Image (cartoon, grey):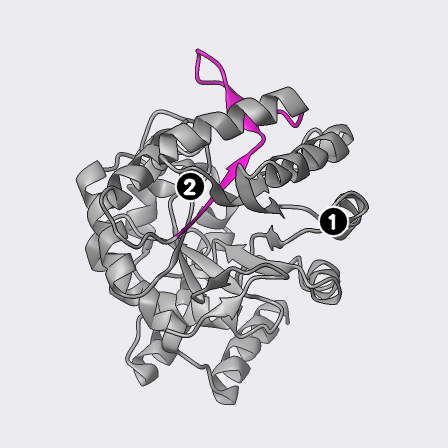
Amino acid sequence: MNIRQLGDSDLHITPIGFGAWAIGGPGWAFAWGDQDDHDSVAAIHTALDAGINWIDTAAVYGLGHSEEVVARALAGKRERPYIFTKCGMVWDEDRDISFRLKADSIRRECEASLRRLRVDAIDLYQVHWPKPAEDIEEGWATLAELREEGKVRHIGVSNFDAGQLRRALAIAPVTSLQPPYSLLDRGIEREVLPFASRHDIGVIAYSPMASGLLSGAMTHERVVNLPPNDWRRGSPNFQEPHLSRNLSLARLLRVIGHEHEVPAGAVAVAWVLHNPAVTGAIVGARAPGQVAGIVAAAYLSLESHDIAAIDSFFAREAA
């Protein structure tokens, strides 16, 4: 699997990274339903065996549980992948989540993540959301201090727009940006991706399969039967009038994938990676059997007629 330099860092990452959001399990506001930790560990092992060399998680995923599962999966590994995690979302004893970028809060979060991940330094530490907006400078300056202290190796941001990236750059270089990017969410193309390219900021896109909608495995019936504790039940993309359109797109991706002998989800991820401003894509897996489809995207080069077919789909929808 080819590797790509992430921004101005010494991190050279595979085009696909293992996303650890869903393996945080149930019991918090943005859960994906119940999750078996043994399946999670097996999925991580399968991804690493396939050549994936980075894992992206966050403290808030499962309220600390995702980081603990990642540590469990990596225990005893002689060569471990890069570990990326995030700060800025905290929770209280009632499991209620809030946003915080004050220096003392970020330092507490960093220490807690180091303990849960069982590492001496975090390879990439990211501000999860630019909230509260008035504390962006304080939060980013604190990450820069943590890097100088050796607790984190590199620092990045997630969900920042171009103006917020500019504010961060006034304080310290930004190694990477983690934005949502998929065929169903292209909002970063106009300003954010060009800004990142101009400033040598690596881009690691999340939700390239639109939270499973473009995987090829989603159906109307499956959406209706999503468990009550799956956050996707409340997402507009999983509801009409958007759902039928989105599943039609997934069927097109399945046709394109059939020509390349890969699943629809691999086509969706390859489309994201086709953009030269994107360094890598974060794709989650909840069981080892899902990993092969993920890895296929790293080797898939979409042809001009594939891109044209996708563009034609959206042109028809807009007509």
The amino acid at mark 1 is Leu
Give the percent coordinates (x, y) of residue 13.
Answer: 46, 63
Labelled disc at residue 112: none
Q: Is residue 266 visible?
A: yes
The amino acid at mark 2 is Arg
Quadrant including the N terminus: bottom left
Give the percent coordinates (x, y) of residue 27.
Answer: 35, 25
Which residue carries the number 2 mark? 232
Position above or below: 90 against 182:
above
Q: Residues within 10 Å of mark 1 (few under 14, many from 20)?
A: many
Seen from the viewer's position, the closer of residues 132 and 173 is: 173
* Cα–Cα span, label 1 and label 2: 28 Å
* Front disc: 1 or 2: 1
Sequence-wise, the earlier of marks 1 and 2 is 1
- Helix, strand or loop under label 1: helix
Q: Residue at x 49, y 50 (%)?
A: 237
Q: Are marks 1 and 2 in contact (CB under 8 Å)?
A: no
Q: Residues within 10 Å of mark 2 (few under 14, many from 20)?
A: many
Q: Residue at x 64, y 37 (%)?
A: 143
Is residue 32 highlighted in magenta? no
Give the percent coordinates (x, y) of residue 69.
Answer: 29, 37
Seen from the viewer's position, the closer of residues 121 and 113 is: 121
Magenta range is: 82-102
Give the percent coordinates (x, y) of residue 41.
Answer: 23, 44
Which residue carries the number 1 mark? 165
